[in-house]
Structure formats: C-alpha cells, structure tokens
C-alpha cells in the first residue's frame, strides 16, 4: 500500500487571495471613501479575516500601494517618438486614476504619506520608482526631469480628485498633454 498525498496542503486555500483583497479594497474605497475604508471593512468585503490581510500587509498604506501597483500594472510606453510616449503615458495615467476606487485610493494614500515618512518611502520606492525608471529609459531623460513630469501630471490629477472627487475629463487631459509636451518634444541635449 502506498501512502496517499493530500490533494492540497492543510488549511484554507490561498490562491488568488491578493486578487480578492485588491478587488475588495478598490470597491470599499469606491463605496465608502479612502478614510472609511478600514482594513476591517476591506476584510469583510473580501470575506476573509483581517488577520489574513495583516499577515501580508502590515498597514493599510502598504495594502493600498500594492493594490495600486496591481491596478496600474506596467506603463505602456507606446509611440514612435518622445511626444507620443509622453502623451500615451499621461492618457494611460488619467485612465487608470479614473477607474472606480483607484483615484480615491491613490489620493488617500498620497495624502497619508505627507505625514508618514515610512509610507512615503513605500510609495516612492514601490510605486513611483518603477514608473520613473521606465520613463527615464524610454525618454532618455535624467531623473530630475522625469520626476518633474510625474509631479506635474500626477499632482494635477490628484489635485482634481481632491477638489472635485472626480477624475479629469478627456478635454482636460488633452489640455494637460498639450501643456506638458513642449518640455519633452526635443531630445534632452538639444538646445
């Protein structure tokens, strides 16, 4: 007689838990707002224990950053030239921020990071840096110029979310693209 191997390890199944938690996070933030979307409420919406969340993410801010990373995914740096790359990146960012819960979560965690140095480091290193590096490579721009691009674009979009509770409309995104493009049409070393 041969020993049998269990079909799965003991305990609760864990596959897809991040997907469930991220979906619950965005829907809870969308329905209740960032401040009222507590880990307890997110866990209830996900149908899991809050300890399951805290085992993976020690704080709400860390959860939100990972949720945003999942929601944003890689930046599609598409286009034949620098202007097209910048334009597509801005439009992509606006589209992502306009998704239900994403803009609210981004604005909320950004606001919390102002007075939380640890969260600010997580937000900078885990969320901003990968996009900054991808843009630096695609545009051949130095770090300070790409950070300025991110500040102007994301700052404007988050300001709109904070002031109106709504993402930017397409016409305003078009105007933002037109305002930013002159700074990135030329190669970095050209006059």
Image (cartoon, grey):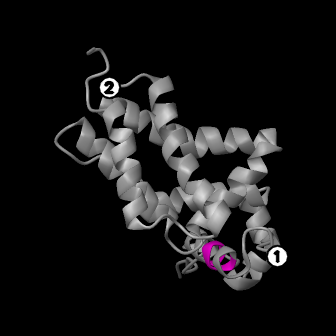
> Which x, y percent locates residue 54?
79, 63
User: CA–CA distance between discs 2 and 1?
Assistant: 44 Å
Q: Do tag 2 and tag 1 residues touch (Cβ < 8 Å)?
A: no
Q: From where the camera sits, is residue 121 visible?
A: yes
Q: From where the camera sits, is residue 14 visible?
A: no
Q: Main secondary structure of the magenta part?
A: helix
- Tell me which label, 2 or 1, sits earlier in the chain: 1
In which quadrant of the rendered image does the C terminus lie?
A: top left
Give the residue at x 73% y 79%: 32
Q: Is residue 22 magenta?
A: no
Q: Nearer the viewer, residue 131 or 154?
A: 154
Of tags 2 and 1, which is closer to the observer?
Answer: 2
Q: Nearer the viewer, residue 40 or 104?
A: 104
> Which x, y percent locates residue 147?
51, 32
Give the residue at x 70% y 77%: 11
Pointer 2 residue: 140
Q: Is residue 27 magenta?
A: yes
Left or right position of 32 against 168: right
Left or right position of 148 against 77: right
Please give the label number shown on residue 92: none
Does 173 sit above or below residue 79?
below
> Which x, y percent locates residue 68?
57, 59
Range of magenta residues: 24-28
Residue 20 figure quarter: bottom right
């Amino acid at each position: 007689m041969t020993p049998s191997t269990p079909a799965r390890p003991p305990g609760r199944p864990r596959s897809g838990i991040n997907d469930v938690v991220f979906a619950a996070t965005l829907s809870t933030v969308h329905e209740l707002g960032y401040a009222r979307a507590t880990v307890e409420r997110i866990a209830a919406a996900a149908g899991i224990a809050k300890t399951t969340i805290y085992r993976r993410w020690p704080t709400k801010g860390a959860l939100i950053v990972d949720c945003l990373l999942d929601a944003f995914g890689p930046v599609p740096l598409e286009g034949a030239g620098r202007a097209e790359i910048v334009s597509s990146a801005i439009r992509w960012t606006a589209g992502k921020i306009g998704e239900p819960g994403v803009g609210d979560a981004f604005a909320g965690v950004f606001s919390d990071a102002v007075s939380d140095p640890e969260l600010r480091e997580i937000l900078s290193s885990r969320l901003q840096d990968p996009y900054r590096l991808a843009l630096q490579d695609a545009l051949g721009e130095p770090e300070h110029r790409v950070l300025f691009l991110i500040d102007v674009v994301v700052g404007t979009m988050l300001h709109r979310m904070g002031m109106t509770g709504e993402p930017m409309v397409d016409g305003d995104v078009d105007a933002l693209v037109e305002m930013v493009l002159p700074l990135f049409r030329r190669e970095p070393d050209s006059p």
